[in-house]
Structure formats: structure tokens, C-alpha cells
Amino acid sequence: MKDPASALDRVDRRILALLQSDGRMSNLALAQAVHLSPTAVLERVRRLVREKFILGYEARLNPQKLDASLLVFIEVMLDRNTPDVFEQFKSSVRDRLEVMECHMVAGEFDFLLKTRVADMDAYRSFLSDVLLTLPGVRETHTYAVIDEVKNSQALRVE
């Protein structure tokens, strides 16, 4: 099976890198940066979106200004490893705004959650009133972040 990334040429990769660093870059500025016409660049960007190399655009918000300054990672172990319990848990966490990311992992626990809340009191409420009441949750381990050393969604494209 052919690697999808191998379909990208040097210009496509440069467009992805530029948009990844500044998603609001105008088509004209992008065209000037890659030395193509605005029409050609617009077509390339449309193709990159259509082929799902670009999944979307969003603003990065400041959690400290929006009452979500406490970052907490949570290991979650379920009491039964059955497909219905996994699906119920996944469905439940998808609806929670506190949960920024949820990953099913291999190892000693089943899921790793990345959450943001206002403070430790808010986390304690989230844990007892929400997380521990979700279907199948047997055990959790909490890791409150002391210092966020790096926070990036950037992927290597060049």
C-alpha cells in the first residue's frame, strides 16, 4: 500500500508547514511564500483539505483567561474489557468539555485523558461527580501538571 504522504510534493509540504504555523495566512501571502499563483495555491489547499491532509482550522485559546488553568492527565482503568463498556465510556467522555483528549492505550490502564478545569476544587468535582460515575470506571490515577513545558499540535511535514 502506498504511503499517502508520498503523494505530497515539496510545495504541498511547504504549504502545510506554513498553514500549520499560521492558519490565518491569506491565500495571497501563501502564494508568495511558495512562489506560485494564488489560483494554483488555492487549488492545492482545496486538494489538501479534500484528501484530509488538512483536517480543519481553529483558534488556540488561552486556558488561563477562560477559567481552565489546571491541566490534568488521568489514567482510567475499566472494570470489564468488553466492547459495550468501552463504547459507553468513549461515548460519555466525548460529551464532556473538560476532556480535551481521550486515548485508548495499551498497557496497565485502558484510557488516558487530558483534561482542563479551573482549579483543584473543580477537578475534585469532575472526578467524583462525573468521571467516577461513568460506565465501567474501576480506577483512576491523576497527574496534575505543574509546568507545561511544551504544548504543540504541530506535525513534521518537511
Image (tube, rainbow, N blue to C red):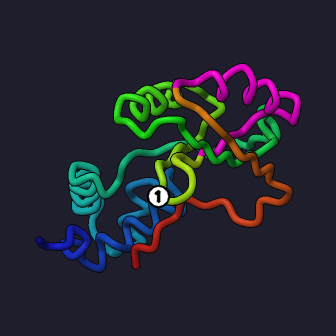
Q: Is residue 130 magenta?
A: yes
Quarter of the picture holding the C terminus: bottom left
Label 1 secondary element: loop
Q: Identify the residue at horizontal 48%, vertical 54% (top origin).
A: 105
**Dot 1 amino acid type:** Ala
Residue found at the very far front of the displayed protein: 80
What percent of the width, then of the height, locates residue 18? Answer: 46, 66
Q: Is residue 104 magenta?
A: no
In the displayed structure image, the side of residue 61 where residue 58 appears, left or right: left
**What's the residue at 75%, 46% (across, down)?**
142
Residue 47 against residue 12 in the figure, above or below: above
**Mark 1 burial class by Cα count in 10 Å: few <14, some 14-19, many 20+:** few
Residue range highlighted in magenta = 113-135
Q: How many marks?
A: 1
152 vs 18, left or right, is: right
Residue 35 lies, with reference to residue 70, above or below; the image says below
- The spot of residue 87 in percent (x, y) is 39, 31
Examine the residues drawn in magenta and state their main secondary structure. helix
